Amino acid sequence: LTDALAPAPVTATHCPYCSLQCGMGLRAASDAAGGLDVVPRDFPVNRGALCGKGSTAPALLARPLRLTEPLIRRPASGRLEPASWDEALALVVERLGAVRRDHGADAVGVFGGGGLTNEKAYALGKFARVVLGTSQIDYNGRFCMSSAAAAHQRAFGVDRGLPFPLADVSRTGCVILTGSNMAETMPPAVRHLRELRENGGTLIVVDPRRTKTAELADLHLAPRPGTDLALALGLLHLVVAQGHVDEEFVRERTAGWEAARAAAMAHWPELVERITGVPVPQLRAAVDLFCGATDGMVLTARGAEQHSTGTDTVGAWINFCLATGRAGRPLSGYGCLTGQGNGQGGREHGQKADQLPGYRKLADPAARAHVAGVWGVDPDSLPGPGRSAYELLDALGGEVKALLVMGSNPVVSAPRATHVEGRLRELDFLAVADVVLSETAALADVVLPVTQWAEETGTMTNLEGRVLLRRAAITPPDGVRSDLHVLNSLAEKLGCEVTAKKFPADPEEVFEELRLASAGGAADYSGITYARIEAEDGVFWPCPQEGHPGTPRLFLDRFATEDGRARFVEVSYREVDEETDAAYPLVLTTGRVLAQYQSGAQTRRVPGLNAAAPGAYVEMHPLVADRLGVGDGDPVTVTSRRGRATAPARVTGAIRSDTVFMPFHWAGEGRANNLTNPALDPVSKMPAFKACAVRVERAAPA
Ligand code: SF4
């Protein structure tokens, strides 16, 4: 080949979307448009495969789709109009400074995102606490898997989504997958489920809908939404009753079994059938399959977690794993399938209301002293824990008067979205840093256009706790700056020179500081460097020294509690916050579709994805449709105690007849989160996205 014919070099990187963080290559496109082509790349979680979102990701870089200049809302027109960076940053500094001066530091809030790189999440948490001095910072990951994180911490002493590599799933004996429609949310991961069955293992899927994932299962349990806690307790009851408890494991490696066992024994199979709608023979079949295998895993996702009982539901599943000895051993354990691209890393480095980098607790004096030492500030100057995500959004326009949003679109993704949108409109000042003009950015006083994915380098931590390097493959357009650059500029203008120097715009410099801040914490990154990630294509945390190999499998010798034992937690069934009644007789559950991602701010702008999934719909059983007198495609209005949404009916026998389903990716009249219930789990503060009471009515044709 001559140089002219040689293929362009490939940049090895990862997908911009979900927590699988599929490996991919990017190469300069052969056409004249100057874009990028995606090429397959072997990486353990996806082995070259990508879903439609990943394969179309270069469309996100196109100019008409993304922002390329700052915008300011001009008083004369009331509209967002182009501005220079100097003008936009000066306005942010002036308005945040004024709110802080007039109402105190906690009147300024910060709302981050689970898609931000580790470096950005770290810098944002530090910026909030050191420069703004506010306790009011949280992020949209609170909506994602905080209940699983809380339960993980409570039982194992540390929270890592999967305590083993995803590929282990294909080699275990039985998997209970609960509340995950993996075939739509992360299709390349389905290969591991298929291989599990090819290797002789079995798959049990728990979901109120017969999803594409449920169709792969040996056994599908379809409980009423919001009753997952009863289901897990009923299965544990059967484990005890049928003599499947691993007494030696319970004795040697756990604590608290007696109280947990007594609580579970109150959940008789017949009672559990009445609560969940899952017949007793299916409960028995699930226990027989799981306990008949030599090893097994329980994997939860949002369907099990996004409830006001979410932490206890995950706790009950962990109890089930511990009682059967399926934890702390190779090819066994409990794991959570995180959702957002950096859902794992995003919560480790300090953008969460109650945490400091390294998974340290903000209320812990030793943790404050360590991190303050790295930041060069007085520990007493650091604010304490602030409001959780929904509580923060609910306080906007009240005690919180100004908000900086980075990488999040709560207008679509927050529960009770009409109310949240109203609170955002009540703010004295709203600044949003984003790649596109999301529905939240459209409400802002200042919009800062930032670099993304293939235009910048940074680390992400995927659902396995594997720290990865996303590499820049293309020069960003003129007019955009990185989030780190934005924080550097704001720190300089809002603070003193000392702080500005401590907010470098270079991601590797930030990562070097993050390593120090995380050292000795649960999520210890101190042995991980950019060079190592590059050489090894990812390193699992904890990795406490540079010579340390990283930790793909946790808990094999001991759990991360003080005495090394896992903790059973005594949990009993309680109803979700909102039950059905005569006025609201159906349960609404919400979720995701293959061609859209989270609030849809990016994917709705990609033509191929939008064509595949152009809008919301209301999935209902034929019995419900007959009662309403509606056919497939007829418009229906769904009403809850908080609001209404209108979308076409999709009639299918693949859903329970007491349940309707809406995907939540859209704004406008089909916004599913108009309906959802912001009732919070008492431990994790996770809102109850997955079950609320609604009525459905025929709507007038559009
Ligand atoms: Fe990207 Fe997730 Fe699709 Fe993989 S499964 S290509 S990470 S969106």
Image (spheres, rainbow, N blue to C red):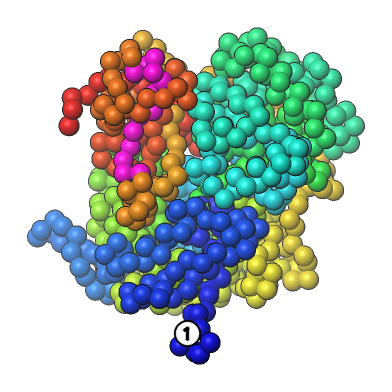
How far across and how far down the image is residue 54, in percent?
47, 57
The reply, left or right, for residue 189 in relation to residue 410 is: right
Residue placed under numbered mark 1 in the picture? 5
Label 1 C-beta lies within 8 Å of the nearest ligand 1 atom: no
Q: Is residue 329 in view from this perspective?
A: yes
Residue 314, located in which quarter of the rendered image?
top right
Residue 245, located in which quarter of the rendered image?
top right
The reply, left or right, for residue 185 in relation to residue 692 is: right
Q: Does the magenta segment cover residue 614?
A: yes
Above or below: residue 143 compared with residue 209: below
Q: Does the magenta segment cover residue 479?
A: no
Q: Residue at x 56, y 15 (%)?
A: 277
Secondary structure of the residue carrying numbered label 1:
loop
Q: Residue at x 36, y 46 (%)?
A: 612
Q: Residue at x 69, y 12 (%)?
A: 268
Q: Farthest residue toward the bottom?
A: 2
Q: Is residue 105 in view from this perspective?
A: no
Q: Quadrant of the C terminus?
A: top left
Residue 249, located in which quarter of the rendered image?
top right
Q: Give the magenta range.
A: 613-625
